[in-house]
Amino acid sequence: MLKTRIIPTLLWKNIGLVKGIGFDSWRRVGTVLPAIKVYTMREVDELILLDITATDEMREPDYETIADWAQECFVPVTIGGGIRNLEQIRRLLRCGADKVSINSAAYEQPNLISEAAKRFGSQCVVVSIDARKTANGDYECYSHSGRLPTGKRPGEWARFCEGLGAGEILITSIELDGTMQGYDLKLIEEVTRQVSIPVIASGGAGSPQHMLEAIQHGANAVAAASIFHFTEQTPAQVRDFLFSQGIPVRRTVT
Amino acid sequence: MSVLIIDYGMGNLASVRRAFEEAGAHVFISNDPSDMADAERLVLPGVGAFHDAMEALREKGWDKAIKQAALKDGLPVLGICLGMQLLAEMGTEGGETQGLGLIPGRVIRLEPVHGKERIPHVGWNEVHFQGPHSLFDGIEKGTDFYFVHSYHFVPHDKENALAITPYCGSFVSVVGRGTVLGTQFHPEKSSKAGLRLLKNFLKIK
């Protein structure tokens, strides 16, 4: 049986590992490389590494640094931040990325998704969607690290991206991110109902119970950062909890 | 043991190299088939689409060189993910495309058998060996390996299916014919069990 993945997310800004609340008030929580080494040693299911300022600063991905990190990463890794063209994707895959995550560029040039899927295969194209609740209780997608409203609804946008060839959706609740109050379950449902590709839930995890809820609401994988940075919880403990609740998870040999 | 990783412009080369180095191999990455003279093992990695990958291989003459090495010289070959699929006679991703034809069979899309199965098949799933094989030495039956793919290899001959994985019914996750081997999962990303499998590949005679 396919196992439900638990995925630590590492956000970085100028080499340092950071974590914010609601895509704001970033605080430094360490350096990236040691974190990658620890997660590799602990045999996490996957890692997501996102450069949160590359797009806004109109920067290229920092290939050299990413290659150094990937060297130490023996678990599957998704890399994102600042990706705007096929050549960048090619180079990131070459550096050791297993998948790339595309967010802002997808709204400006949707054909990047279809071309990337055609050239590199859908399996390595993750579309990352950041969404915020609107006044009337719906959701709207935001680009550029949650700064620019796009007028798109997450479920419909996810479905559109699936049609273009996206292989996975990473859905993040902007308001709940970093709050550790739990995932936005309604948002997860809105997206998982609309697509037939895997969906990774992100934003708000504060306990293993929150992860269980996200999975019960349709998520195929759960991503989290704060819970691992700021609490004693480890991915292995989350795994044990989910296993006790009947969720298929990977059992690693210790 | 010298391992040549074929660079045809679309592989996750860095991870494969690193994992083989960890397994104790001397690794070199090459985009020139004439380098094969020094190789004791051939690895065909792969991220991408079948059609484009075959075109890239043909462009450099890798298709003929790989066949020659595998069939005439008996050089052990390991195809990983798309690299495994390319061993087939025919692929259907991006239009029907002729593959390397080292193992009889076709590559087709995974079809969910119930609504909860999503495609691509992404994550850790069990690999059930169909019989003993030196590639699996020291690895427990049913160990989880890391997958990320939408297509799968349907071998023509049952004896070329070395392992199966339960998803979309079940699909063949390891193929083999003589010393030509292929894994649908990524051993280089499958932590300890994956590393063990690569070490086993280095020992195959």
Image (tube, rainbow, N blue to C red):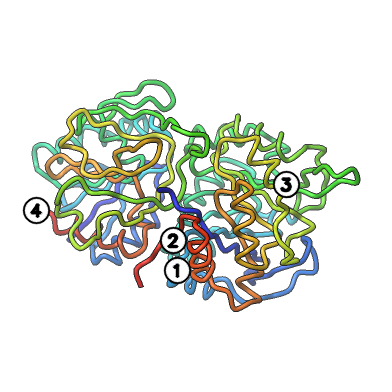
Image quadrant of residue A35? bottom right
Residue B99 in which image quadrant: top left
Residue in the picture at 23% in, 55% down: B3
Query: Would you say A124 lies left or right of B196 here?
Result: right
Q: Which quadrant would the N terminus of chain B be assigned to in this image?
A: bottom left
Residue holding disc 2: A75
Q: Say what amino acid the circle numbered 1 marks.
A: Thr
Q: Which labelled disc corresponds to residue A162?
A: none
Label 4 and label 2: CA atoms lie apart by 29 Å
Q: Look at the numbered disc 4 and give the secondary structure of its residue.
A: loop
Mark 1: few, some, or many residues within 10 Å (few <14, many ≥20)? some
How far apart are the two marked residues, 4 and 3, measured between alpha carbons? 54 Å
Same subunit, tags 2 and 3: yes
Q: Residues within 10 Å of mark 4 (few under 14, many from 20)?
A: few
Q: Using a 10 Å C-alpha cutoff, classify the residue at mark 2 as few (fewer than 14 neighbours), some (14 to 19) or many (20 or more).
A: many
Q: Position of residue B141 (x, y in %)?
A: 25, 55
Judging depth in this view, the residue of B162 and A149 nearest the camera is: B162
The residue where tag 4 is placed is B205
Marking on residue A40: 1
Q: CA distance from mark 1 to mark 2?
A: 6 Å
Evaluate whether label 3 is on the same chain as label 1.
yes
* Circles 1, 2 touching at the beta carbon (< 8 Å): yes
Instruction: Name the residue: 74% across, 56% down.
Output: A57
